[in-house]
C-alpha cells in the first residue's frame, strides 16, 4: 500500500509507492553508475607517526557534487513518487521541483533521502511499537552500497 507522507501542516504531502527488491537493485546500479570515473572514496596513506602503518581517510574528491546529488534524488523520486499534493502530471521529473514551495523543499528532499537509506539498508522500514516509543527495526544491515546520497559540502575542512 503506498505511503502518504505529510510534508508540513497536513496540506502538502507526497505518496511513495511500495518499494521492492527490484527498487533496491535499480538504486544500487544507478548509484554505482553515477560513481564511475570518480576517485576512490578512501585514501590509504602512511601514518606520519609510524610509516609502517597505513591509515585511511575520506577522499574529498570522491564526493558527489551538488548537481550530482540532485540528479540522484530526482532519479529516485521519478521511480518512487506515485502522487503528491502539488501540481504537474506524474511521473515526477526534475522540472516538477518548480511546483514545490521553497519552505517545503527540504522536507521533500528528506523524504527522498530517507527512501534512499531504506533502499541501501534493504530491511523493513522502521516501525514504532507504541505511543512514545523509540523507532525500532528488526535487523540492522550494514551499508554495502557503492554510494550514498551526499550532503552539501561543509565549509569546515576535514579533520578540523
Image (tube, helix red, strand yellow):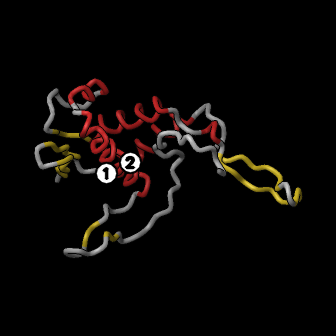
- In the picture, measured across the screen, residue 68 lies left or right of residue 42, that is left
- Calculate the distance from the C-alpha at mark 2 to the C-alpha at mark 1: 12 Å
Count of marks, rendered view = 2
Residue 19 lies left or right of residue 158; in this view the side is: left
SS of the residue at dot 2? helix
Report the residue marked by disc 1. 20
The reply to whether the C-beta atoms of the residues labelled 2 and 1 are less than 8 Å apart is no
Please determine whether, in this image, residue 45 is positioned above or below residue 135. above
**Residue lying farthest to the top in this orientation:** 95
Q: Position of residue 23 (x, y in %)?
A: 35, 46
Above or below, 41 relative to 90: below
Given residues 86 and 140, the one toward you in this image is 86
Residue pictured at 35% horizontal, 33% vertical: 74
User: Between tags 2 and 1, which lies in front?
Assistant: 2
Q: Residues within 10 Å of mark 2 (few under 14, many from 20)?
A: many
Identify which residue, 124 or 103, lies in the foreground: 103
For label 1, the SS is loop
Looking at the rendered structure, which numbered label has been put on residue 34? none
State the residue at coordinates (66%, 51%): 159
Residue 2, placed above or below residue 127: above
**Residue in the foreground of this view, choosing between 116 and 102:** 102
The image position of residue 123, as x and y in percent, is 37, 61
Tell me the residue at 18%/48% (across/down): 8
Residue 92 in percent (x, y) is at 25, 31
Image x and y of residue 15, in percent: 19, 45
Name the residue: 42% across, 46% down: 25
Q: Residues within 10 Å of mark 1 (few under 14, many from 20)?
A: few
Q: Which mark is residue 116?
A: 2
Please tell me which of labels 2 and 1 falls first in the chain: 1
In the image: residue 121, left or right of residue 153: left
Amino acid at each position: 500500500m503506498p505511503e502518504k507522507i505529510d510534508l508540513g501542516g497536513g496540506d502538502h504531502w507526497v505518496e511513495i509507492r511500495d518499494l521492492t527488491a527490484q527498487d533496491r537493485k535499480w538504486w544500487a546500479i544507478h548509484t554505482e553508475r553515477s560513481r564511475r570515473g570518480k576517485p576512490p572514496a578512501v585514501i590509504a596513506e602512511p601514518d606520519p607517526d609510524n610509516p609502517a602503518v597505513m591509515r585511511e581517510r575520506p577522499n574529498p574528491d570522491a564526493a558527489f557534487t551538488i548537481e550530482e546529488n540532485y540528479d540522484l534524488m530526482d532519479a529516485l523520486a521519478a521511480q518512487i513518487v506515485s502522487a503528491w499534493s502539488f501540481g504537474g502530471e506524474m511521473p515526477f521529473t526534475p522540472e516538477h521541483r518548480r511546483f514545490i514551495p521553497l519552505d517545503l523543499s527540504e522536507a521533500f528532499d528528506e523524504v527522498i533521502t530517507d527512501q534512499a537509506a531504506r533502499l541501501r539498508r534493504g530491511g523493513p522500514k522502521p516501525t514504532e511499537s507504541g505511543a512514545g516509543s523509540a523507532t525500532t527495526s528488526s535487523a540492522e544491515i550494514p551499508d554495502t552500497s557503492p554510494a550514498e546520497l551526499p550532503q552539501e559540502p561543509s565549509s569546515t575542512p576535514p579533520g578540523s
